[in-house]
Image: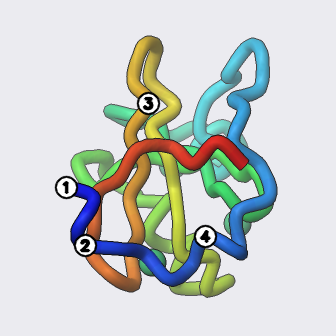
Amino acid sequence: MASASCAHLDQVEVTELPEPVEGCEECLRTASSWVHLRMCLTCGTIGCCDNSPNRHATVHFRETGHPLVRSAEPGESWAWCYVDELGLAVPSG
Ligand SMILES: [Zn+2]
Ligand SMILES: [Zn+2]
Ligand SMILES: [Zn+2]
């Protein structure tokens, strides 16, 4: 699990979740719903997962190139790199 590595950890700026997590910012704007929440580790934007109708976390990656998200679900502390398609623990900063 430590053998595969992500080369994008230098783009991690935000690792702590906001308190509380209000929801997917774009879905709240458009009165849509989501399944699970992700947070961009570069700018802290909350987006929704790929099981959600609007997949805003992935849209955010495509629009901004911010490579890493973490789960914003309670008790979950995994991260995902879209570029490397690699799961990892949330970096400690
Ligand atoms: Zn990476
Ligand atoms: Zn959304
Ligand atoms: Zn971002």
Q: Pointers 3 and 4 in contact (CB under 8 A)?
A: no
How is the protein colored in the picture?
A: rainbow
- The image position of residue 80, as x and y in percent, is 38, 58
Give the number of the disc on residue 9: 4
Q: Nearer the viewer, mark 3 or mark 2?
A: 2
Q: Nearer the viewer, mark 4 or mark 1?
A: 1
Disc 2 marks a residue whose amino acid type is: Ala
CA distance separating discs 2 and 1: 6 Å
Disc 1 marks a residue whose amino acid type is: Met
* Residue 88 left/right relative to 15: left
Question: Under 8 Å from ligand 1: the CB of mark 4?
Answer: yes
Instruction: Determine the image quadrant of residue 66.
Output: bottom right
Give the number of the disc on residue 37: none
CA distance separating discs 3 and 1: 15 Å
Q: Which residue is mark 2?
A: 4
Q: Secondary structure at mark 1?
A: loop
Residue 25 in sight from this viewpoint: no
Disc 4 marks a residue whose amino acid type is: Leu
Disc 3 marks a residue whose amino acid type is: Ser
Question: Under 8 Å from ligand 1: the CB of mark 3?
Answer: no
Q: Which residue is mark 1?
A: 1
Q: Which residue is mark 3?
A: 77
